[in-house]
Structure formats: structure tokens, C-alpha cells
Image (tube, helix red, strand yellow):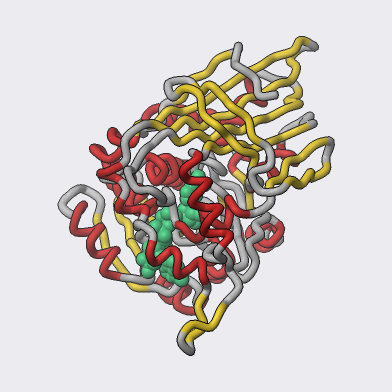
Amino acid sequence: MGRALIIGAGGVASVVVHKCCQNSEVFEEICIASRTKSKCDALKAKLDGGKTKITTAQVDADNVEELIALINDYKPDIVMNIALPYQDLTIMEACLATKTHYLDTANYEPPETAKFEYSWQWAYRKRFEEAGITAILGCGFDPGVTGVFSAYAAKHYFDEIHYIDILDANAGDHGYPFATNFNPEINIREVTAKGSYIENGEWVETEPMEIKRVYNFPEIGEKDMYLLHHEELESLALNINGIKRIRFFMTFSEKYLTHLKVLENVGMTSIEPIMYEGKEIIPLQFLKAVLPDPASLGPRTKGKTNIGCIYQGIKDGKPVEYYVYNVCDHQECYKEVGSQAISYTTGVPAMIGAMLLMKGEWKKPGVYNVEEFNPDPFMKALNEWGLPWKETFSPELVD
Ligand code: NDP
């Protein structure tokens, strides 16, 4: 059917590449392009020989001109941004200049401030519309599948959704005292930031990890979870009809939180540059360099993730409660694609979003969050491509 340019060659990109190769009818050709070309070549070496034709390239995705040259040379149908949130805007600029469709898994975040919101990317709506190209924002699991779940719930089971709780549990154990499951810099910026949720149209801010709940997750059991700020709260509050409150919770073990507290207390999670032996360094970037590479956690991680959403609202005047979730086994993911479940649950939805765009089912000029598309083909594809979901109309609620 077509060709995709995949930017990035880290943990999530590896899964995207594996999944595109499994789906060679749609992804006839892919180019893996990243800052470190040897990582792209290593991925190609693993997967060469199948039906999808793989090429690789070196690119600095902070540089718009380099991106434009690569896109003009390769002429992809879509650019999949699986690098870091810092590259969202440069890649979107290059897509505009070359009239190429765009997809990412995380919203833009300026490197110098740990603050992520959609305003920067939503500002591109008119230009994408006029150029006749589609941008799909946040097409991983959360954000991503959480938005698709919400659109599905709204379409099939509710007239109004009043409350959404997004619950992200990782019961995986990698055996290290401390490691992050995806890019350490992005992950630590996210979890050390203030928490927030939306109530009656207003953001309510909390101290980091101030709100804790215990939840009994299906197939995982009881876990401590903490309220975090998360990007899909912003778009879902606007796109889902009737929202009164929307919150996001993620599980953390006591061990993880203790390590994080110590690192924070000694200044290792700071993004303020400091001078070290005559050279300016950013403590968090240095910390990333000494922590285990998330892409290396695959063989060590055992256990499951459970990510899903609980909805409360009304249908035909009657109250409805609905919980839809996916359970993913780290070791099963490793057996299939050589990665742990966090990369897997992000990479599979990115492939599905790109597939639906290429098939024309999710193609409309402009910049969109995933809940603005028809959820049905995506929900079907989740079952077919490795992330089957389960639902119940009598969930345990979060107080
Ligand atoms: P990694 O750090 O493992 O990989 C990032 C890749 O991007 C690396 O290959 C890196 O190159 C490359 N890269 C970084 N900067 C540049 C640049 N300027 N030019 C070209 N390539 C660059 O990250 P992950 O795979 O763990 O995460 C990828 C994305 O997925 C992130 O945006 C993350 O926020 C998002 N994510 C989304 C989730 C969701 O559910 N929506 C969940 C988890 C992650 P190099 O090898 O040289 O460093």
C-alpha cells in the first residue's frame, strides 16, 4: 500500500518497526531514520528478509532543513515521529513543507521547561488543513488508546460522560533497584511535575504524588497509584461530551518513589544546567546516561501492565458505569518483538494509527487528537495486532 518514514530508533520505535514489518501489506516500505544511524541499522539487520523493504538514514530531527531533504528524498506517505516530544514541532514543520501526513505519540514539550500541553501543536490546525494533510497527535497508549477508548465509550454506551478515571498500572519487575520503562528524561520530568486534574472545566493542581489511591486491578491485583498530570486530560475534557471531572493515575512501587525522592533531594532530576569540570551539564541528562537503557529491560522484565479507563455517565437518562482496559504481559511482548510491554503498548497503537491513515479511514486534513476519529476500526485493530481489550459494566470505582 505505501511507505512510512519512522523517526527514532529507541525502545518504542523498535516495536513500531517490528509491527510495520508484520503488516507488510500496508507498510510495503519503511525507512528508519534517527540521530544515531547504527541503531537504525541494527533494527534493519534484525528484520531484513521479510516482505517490508527497509532502508535507514541519519537525521537530526531538530533540524527542519535536514528533515525536509530526507522527506523529499524518501517521499513517504506518512512520517511517524517516534523520537522525543522535543522534535514534534520541527517534524510538523517539515511535514507541512513537503505536504506529508504526520503522527506522534507524545505532545510537544520545550526542552528548557518541563511543561507539556497541546497549544503548540493545535496552533498548526489551519496550516495542516490548508495543506490537505493529517496530523494524528498522541497515538501511543496513554495518550492514544485512552482517547480511542473514550471515543468508543461515548459513541456506543453514553449520551454524556461525566467522570473519567484513566488508570495506568505496571506490575512489571525488571530486577533493577531503579530504572524507567521509557526514556528516563521524559519519564522523570513527567513524574516529578505537579499533579493536576480537571474539575468543572478548571485545572486543579496538586503537589507531586499528593493524591494516592489503592486499586484492585484485574489480572494484577492491588496497587498503590498516584494522581499525575497527563496530556490527554486536556484534549478529552474538550472532545468528550459532558465531562465534569477527569483524572489520571499511575502506579508506582515504594522502592521507585524512594529512589526518586533521593535523586530529587540531591538535585539529580533538575533540568537547570550546572557547571561540571568546566562544562555545562544538565543533571537529569547525566542521570539518564547512568540509568539502564529502557530498550535493554525487555529480557529482564516479568509481570503485566493494565491500562484502561473507567467512565461514569448517563445513557437514556439512566446511570452507566463502564471500564475498558488492556492487560499486556512483558514476557509475551519480549518473545514476540524483543521489547517490554511499555514500549509494546506504545508502538502497536502508533502502527495502527498510521495504518488507518494510510487506508484512508483516519485521513482528514487538519491536526487531531485520536478521540476525534472513528474509534471502531482502531478498537478492532487492537484485538488483531496484539492489544486485546476487555470491558465490564460493573467496575470498582475510584473515590
Ligand atoms: P528512546 O529514548 O528509547 O528513543 C528515542 C529515539 O529518538 C532515540 O533513537 C534517539 O536517538 C532519537 N532521537 C532523539 N533526539 C533526536 C533527534 N534530535 N534527531 C533524531 N533522532 C532523535 O525513547 P522511547 O522509545 O522510550 O520513547 C519514544 C517516544 O514515545 C517519546 O516521545 C515518549 O514520550 C513516547 N512515549 C509515549 C507513550 C504513550 O503511551 N503515548 C508511552 C511511552 C513513551 P539516539 O539513539 O541518538 O538517542
In front: 102, or 329? 329
Where's residue 334, x and y in %? Answer: 27, 40
Q: Quadrant of the C terminus?
A: top right
Where's residue 59, x and y in %? Answer: 39, 73
Residue at the image position 71 percent from the left and 58 percent from the top: 119
Relative vertical location of residue 18 with respect to residue 199 in this rendering, above or below = below
Residue at the image position 43 percent from the left and 76 percent from the top: 69
Relative vertical location of residue 178 with respect to residue 224 in this rendering, above or below = below
Residue 251 appears in the figure: yes
> In this rendering, would 399 be left or right of 379?
right
> In this rendering, would 139 be left or right of 300?
right
Residue 75 appears in the figure: no
Relative vertical location of residue 369 with respect to residue 116 in this rendering, above or below = above
- Based on the displayed image, in which of its 4 quarters is residue 154 positioned? top right
Where's residue 279, x and y in %? Answer: 48, 86
In the image, farthest residue toward the bottom: 278
**Badge count:** 0
- Based on the displayed image, in which of its 4 quarters is residue 56 positioned? bottom left
Where's residue 95, x and y in %? Answer: 53, 65
Residue at the image position 33 percent from the left and 53 percent from the top: 295
> In this rendering, would 150 be left or right of 313?
left
In front: 178, or 371? 178
Rendered-image quarter of ligand 1: bottom left
Relative vertical location of residue 149 with respect to residue 312 in this rendering, above or below = below
Residue at the image position 68 percent from the left and 36 percent from the top: 247
In the image, farthest residue toward the left: 49
